[in-house]
Amino acid sequence: MDSGELGKIYHDAEIIIKQGEQGDYMYVVQEGLVEVVYETDRGEVLLALRGKGEFFGEMAIFEREARSATVRALGEARVLTIDKKNFLRRVYEDPSLAFQLVQAMSARIRELSTEVSLLQIKRDVNT
């Protein structure tokens, strides 16, 4: 790691978050790319790709539930870990961060709603 740079470097296919584990941190991709996958009995389902400036694992800041997906590096990725205390301190210093987080989460919910609707239509057509 270069002097003065924050975050941890993860190598290709290295797991950052494991589905089912307890979590209390969120993460921000500083460099590189990570993939978010849902593990099933039949294999993995790719949920999303996150790149520089994007975050993941944010639900752990708000609720202490098991991780809902696995996240791993695609190639080399530098990822910053943020705990609840530091997140709240940063929001206190810059309230616009909270708005940015809610805005991004809202966009993700909208995408998921669209995907669920399309799956519902596809299921209805096939029955």
Image (cartoon, grey):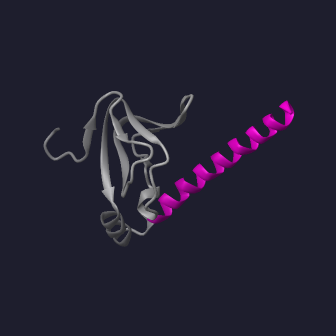
Magenta part of the protein: which range? 98-127
Q: Which quadrant, please, contains the C terminus? A: top right
Identify the residue shown where x is 78% and y is 41%. Answer: 120
User: For residue 10, which quarter of the picture?
Assistant: top left
Q: Position of residue 9 (x, y in %)?
A: 25, 37
Q: Using residue 69 as the reference point, say whether residue 78 is left or right of it.
A: left
Identify the residue shown where x is 61% and y is 52%. Answer: 109
- Residue that sits furthest to the left in the current view: 3
Q: Nearer the viewer, residue 88 or 124?
A: 124
Q: Position of residue 96 (x, y in %)?
A: 45, 65
Identify the residue shown where x is 31% and y is 51%. Answer: 81
Q: Position of residue 71 (x, y in %)?
A: 42, 39
Q: Which quadrant, please, contains the N terminus? A: top left
Main SS type for the magenta part? helix
**Against 93, is 42 above or below?**
above
Please say whether residue 23 is one of the residues in the magenta stretch: no
Q: Position of residue 74 (x, y in %)?
A: 39, 29
**Against 24, is 12 above or below?**
above
